[in-house]
């Protein structure tokens, strides 16, 4: 579980986040959604400690992140996995070397144990036999899966995903979403996803928070979206006329 | 509301820009601010945790890039520096009473004391320095550094320390090689065309030899190597923005490295010769 308390963030005179209080639950896919510039990425970076909030704090279970010293932060980060929007795979390393990197840096596993762990992660993301390829030699969807494999190789307790579907076709997006949800449930980890993708919201949104102009304006699950009387979530999710017609049909069918 | 404490460079606190709003002060405050952050980054790069085998592998890789990858350009430049120095001095001493064998002596000392370390390192600041700034800056932009930070890697240490060790090892060797090739270049460019004889040149090379000059060459090469690795690393590590900012960082890396190499050249000369 990750709990955010009274987070404010200002860049100069610009207030990006205002009084954010939220709890992200373990074993669930927690989604942060909102329009561009709403503060999603800043919030995600605050959660993982890449940006320091102007005030407020973040609890990893019962541990106050901002009371930890550097050594404790590094130790905690070994329990954190992150999938970046552009995958952030190291260009000069092969797929296997990319996934093995955290193991090389922080474990005393034998080379055989490392290879087994890498292969097991590649199997989990349905990507076998690409160990010796470089990131430039595989597709965007495969890069995302390698990114996920690298994020889970240390068996993290907390998984962060920054727009995991950006730049992917709808079919691959669904596969990536499903993969993240399966990993979350199997390993009972706290997963937080920053996304724009409405498919993701409706398919895997077990705990969704909506940000607008730095405020948390709505919280619920994908099941609550249809019936929510909050105009902001309705306008955000069902932004296009096509989606509005779909919503109307869905409501008619349910009644 | 609990305000989170931030780590602010001590220099940034001492020299608060708002205390010195005059434009004249801005350059000084800006320099001190960046110098403070540069020192902090170097301090951070000495921290752990680190796996020696990974660092060793990275150091070897950078030694190959910096050392082996620069041999041809350094050899070429050193050869022509020696050749031109010999030809020019031969011209300048023509018609004077100074013996021709002095050319060997002048070429040797100029090369060892000044030209080999300084010119080689100015060239390396362009080649190696811009490469380091672009590589690390590119990693910052592509979120590779963030990815490592989240894994718990001390990125300053992982990205900078192996390069510094590789530079401090390989650049003095390149400078030593440049000095030898430069003297060889002087011989090849002048003796066959009759500017002076081989005996005169070799006699000059052996005159007034002081091993302290070689020591001075190595001191310069170590200091210059440190400058041309760490300044570009700082510039690359702190890149923000897109490709224009990356280009600017690469340019700044070369310009500042060159300026600080020349400045330190002067101070080393003062310290070691007076």
Image: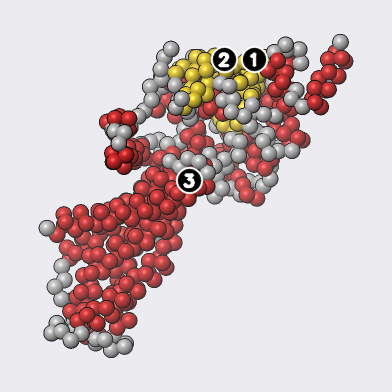
Name the image quarter holding the C terminus of chain B. bottom left
Residue B84: give its label: none
Residue labelled with disc 2? A22
- Could you say which quadrant of the image residue A86 lies in? top right
Do tags 3 and 1 sit on the same chain? no
In the displayed structure image, the side of residue B190 where residue B124 appears, left or right: right
**Circle 1: element type:** strand
In the displayed structure image, the side of residue B70 where residue B242 appears, left or right: right
Residue A224 vertical placement versus A178 (above, below): above
Q: Nearer the viewer, residue A137 or B32?
A: B32
Residue B131 vertical placement versus B46 (above, below): below
Do tags 3 and 2 sit on the same chain? no
Residue at the far bottom: name it.
B194
Label 1 – label 2 distance at C-alpha: 9 Å
Residue B144: image x %, image y %? Answer: 52, 40
| Residue B29 in sight | no
Residue at the (32%, 51%) spot, across then down: B227
Q: Earlier in the sequence, mark 1 or mark 2?
A: 2
Do tags 1 and 2 sit on the same chain? yes
Callouts 3 and 1 close, C-beta under 8 Å? no
Callouts 1 and 2 close, C-beta under 8 Å? yes
Residue A122: image x %, image y %? Answer: 65, 38
Q: Which chain contains the residue that carries disc 2? A: A
Residue A148: image x %, image y %? Answer: 62, 34
Q: Which chain contains the residue that carries disc 3? A: B
Residue B245: give its label: 3
Residue at the (59%, 16%) spot, across then down: A216
Label 3 – label 2 distance at C-alpha: 36 Å
Q: Nearer the viewer, residue B115 or A214?
A: A214
Residue at the (40%, 28%) spot, across then down: A71
Residue labelled with disc 1? A219
């Amino acid at each position: 579980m990750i709990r955010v308390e009274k987070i404010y963030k200002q860049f100069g005179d610009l207030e990006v986040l205002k009084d954010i209080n939220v709890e992200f639950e373990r074993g669930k896919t927690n989604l942060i959604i909102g329009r561009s510039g709403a503060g999603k990425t800043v919030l995600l970076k605050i959660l993982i400690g890449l940006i320091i909030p102007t005030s407020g704090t973040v609890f990893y279970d019962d541990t106050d992140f901002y009371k930890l010293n550097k050594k404790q932060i590094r130790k905690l980060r070994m329990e954190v996995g992150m999938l970046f929007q552009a995958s952030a795979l190291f260009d000069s390393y092969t797929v296997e070397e990319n996934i093995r990197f955290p193991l090389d840096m922080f474990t005393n596993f034998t080379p055989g144990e490392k290879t087994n762990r890498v292969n097991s992660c590649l199997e989990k993301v349905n990507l076998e036999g690409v160990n010796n390829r470089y990131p430039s030699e595989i597709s965007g969807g495969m890069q995302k899966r390698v990114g996920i494999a690298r994020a889970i190789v240390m068996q993290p307790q907390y998984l962060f995903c920054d727009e995991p579907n950006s730049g992917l076709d709808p079919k691959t997006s669904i596969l990536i979403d499903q993969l993240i949800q399966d990993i979350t449930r199997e390993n009972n980890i706290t997963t937080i996803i920053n996304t724009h993708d409405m498919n993701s919201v409706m398919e895997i949104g077990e705990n969704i928070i909506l940000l607008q102009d730095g405020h948390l304006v709505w919280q619920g699950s994908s099941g609550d979206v249809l019936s929510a009387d909050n105009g902001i979530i309705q306008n955000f999710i069902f932004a296009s006329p096509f989606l509005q017609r779909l919503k109307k049909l869905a409501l008619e069918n349910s009644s | 509301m609990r305000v989170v404490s931030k780590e602010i460079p001590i220099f940034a606190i001492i020299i608060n820009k708002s205390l010195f709003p005059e434009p004249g002060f801005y350059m000084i405050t800006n320099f001190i601010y960046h110098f403070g952050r540069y020192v902090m980054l170097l301090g951070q790069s000495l921290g752990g945790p680190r796996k020696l085998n990974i660092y060793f592998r990275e150091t070897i890789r950078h030694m190959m890039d910096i050392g082996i990858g620069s041999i041809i350009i350094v050899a070429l430049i050193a050869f022509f520096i020696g050749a031109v120095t010999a030809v020019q001095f031969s011209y300048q001493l023509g018609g004077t009473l100074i013996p021709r064998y002095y050319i060997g002596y002048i070429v040797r000392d100029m090369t060892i004391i000044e030209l080999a370390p300084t010119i080689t390192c100015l060239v390396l600041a362009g080649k190696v320095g811009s490469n380091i700034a672009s590589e690390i800056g590119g990693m910052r932009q592509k979120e590779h550094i963030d990815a490592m930070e989240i894994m718990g890697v001390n990125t300053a240490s992982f990205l900078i320390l192996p390069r510094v060790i590789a530079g401090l090892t390989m650049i003095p060797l390149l400078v030593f090689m440049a000095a030898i090739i430069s003297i060889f270049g002087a011989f090849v460019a002048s003796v066959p065309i009759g500017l002076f004889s081989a005996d005169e040149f070799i006699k000059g090379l052996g005159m007034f030899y002081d091993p302290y000059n070689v020591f001075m060459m190595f001191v310069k090469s170590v200091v210059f190597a440190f400058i041309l690795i760490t300044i570009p690393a700082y510039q690359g590590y702190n890149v923000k923005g897109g490709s224009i900012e990356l280009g600017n960082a690469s340019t700044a890396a070369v310009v500042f490295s060159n300026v600080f190499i020349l400045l330190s050249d002067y101070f080393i000369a003062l310290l070691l010769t007076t």
